[in-house]
Amino acid sequence: MIPPHFDVDINRFLITNKDCRIVFITSGGTQVPLEKNTVRFIDNFSMGTRGAASAEYFLRAGYAVIFLHREESLKPFSRHFPNIFNSLTLDATGENVVCNLPNLANILKEKLKYEEKIFYASFKTFDQYIERLEHICIHLNPLESRAMIYLAAAVSDFVVTELPTHKIASSTELNLPLSVAPKVIERVVNSFVPNAFIVSFKLETDESKLIPKAKAALNKYGHQLVIANMLSTRKQKVTLVRKNREDGEEIILPAETMNETEIESMIIHRLSGLHQEFIESKF
Amino acid sequence: MIPPHFDVDINRFLITNKDCRIVFITSGGTQVPLEKNTVRFIDNFSMGTRGAASAEYFLRAGYAVIFLHREESLKPFSRHFPNIFNSLTLDATGENVVCNLPNLANILKEKLKYEEKIFYASFKTFDQYIERLEHICIHLNPLESRAMIYLAAAVSDFVVTELPTHKIASSTELNLPLSVAPKVIERVVNSFVPNAFIVSFKLETDESKLIPKAKAALNKYGHQLVIANMLSTRKQKVTLVRKNREDGEEIILPAETMNETEIESMIIHRLSGLHQEFIESKF
């Protein structure tokens, strides 16, 4: 079920931001319930760090951002302060709360500055993700090349087809038949927003398969770009694999800047340039 | 792997609190990884609300609390303010952060008051949960009846026995063979802390099975008490099912107090009394 006012709110957001480029970011993992009255899930690991960090850099690069995130996953700006409560103290009177985290005022200023430039929507299950993604894409399709789709969510690959109504008894052995989930990106590229600039992610743990799989995805779906990354080094290195280019383009965070810089700042800088080229090539 | 200093720290905590009753609360859900280099999990739904709320009432009732929780699940006191960042504002100078949430100062005062009375430990996977639970129980066993074990965590019923090393390819059908997980409570009651006051939970979605299953668990494991609750009404009603008593004892939160009172305040009040009777019966 789409939340009430969802379409009206997106529409208003797109009208307010009609003069800038739009990026639609998906972030966090989807859940697949194992039961209808649901207690247990198959879940995908993701705090949503990539998506939340990217949203900040897109805002700074002048984009308006639609941020479709898993409930409870990280959000831009607040992600820097996961545990504010434990850093709070009381002043000398014992009545007033004091909040002295380094950099908090600066990040808060940025958050307030971009408040009108970001639209939040959330999901929990795979089915909600698909439904909301499709709705948002319907609104973005008329924007054509001005819209970038940035699919950073960790989407379930498998779904459970026949759900038991009640909690599965835990005294018996269980064989869980899983089916391959429909590939969302196929519908995004071919039906939902065929003229947008579409970026997907490929996350692997086996290095030898990473680039071949990224290329296979580009060939299969025909979108613009795959960001390939290894689970273990995803914060230091990614490879941009582009349509009709043989060689991947590596983005590597210099070791000496690891503590002050995030790789997403470099990724979004490059993507913003490529997106601009893409827009100009359409005229 | 047990964190460094874990045993030393627990020991110190128990010595500091040698004059009060101890409750060991487990809280939140456990994860079972589907792969070794792990991206996907079977997860149990739980924010850890029951465990975190209970911890507060146990502290107020004079207990020292060992709180073994799922990473990122709710914690006592901070649970009331899940989203502090979004309520922050800047003062007129634009340089100082202002935090004006209702009741924040009072809850913060309580948190500071009980800081020495609570010991935090965390887990993520099923295996970590078992390992840490066992370690903590080893320290609690000498306390005999003075220790209460309050097993509120949502523990995995199934485990995946043979894990693939790399991410499962998502292009193939998959049949996931799951085995029944070892029942933790069996070892808690019979091996780890046989003389403690042990409370477990039974959560169901099918009302007709709730009380029979709670009784079956008591008969099978021989511990003191099962708190039976339905997923849909768990915040309004629980039934205490006790050893050697035919009838369950219902605890129902009066509808008119729903907004000011939590059912955990009633549960812990009752448990504290039953625990005291249990201690006295041992002399």
Image (tube, coloured by chain):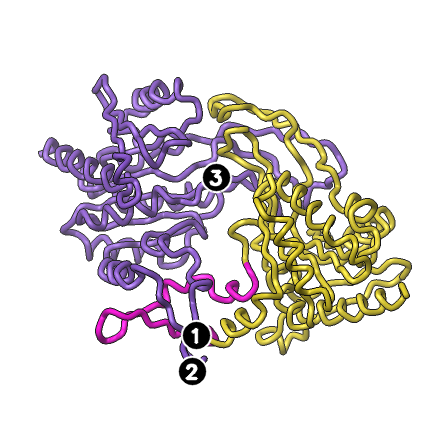
Chain colours: A yellow, B purple
Q: Chain of mark 2?
A: B
Point out residue A52 in the picture as x, y percentages from the top left corner.
Answer: 60, 61
Write the residue at 41% across / 27% down.
B204
Q: Residues within 10 Å of mark 1 (few under 14, many from 20)?
A: some
Is B130 within the magenta? no
Q: Are marks 1 and 2 in contact (CB under 8 Å)?
A: yes
Which label is found at residue B163? none
Q: Chain of mark 3?
A: B
Q: Chain of mark 1?
A: B
The residue at which mark 3 appears reads as B45
The residue at which mark 1 appears reads as B90
Q: Residues within 10 Å of mark 2 (few under 14, many from 20)?
A: few
Residue lying farthest bottom?
Answer: B93
- In the displayed structure image, the side of residue A214 where residue A155 appears, left or right: left
Point out residue B96 in the picture as x, y percentages from the top left corner.
Answer: 41, 78
Point out residue A91 in the picture as x, y percentages from the top left corner.
Answer: 27, 74
Point out residue B95 in the picture as x, y percentages from the top left corner.
Answer: 44, 80
**Circle 2 SS class:** loop
- Asked if marks 1 and 2 fall on the same chain, the answer is yes
Which label is found at residue B93? 2
**Circle 3 SS class:** loop
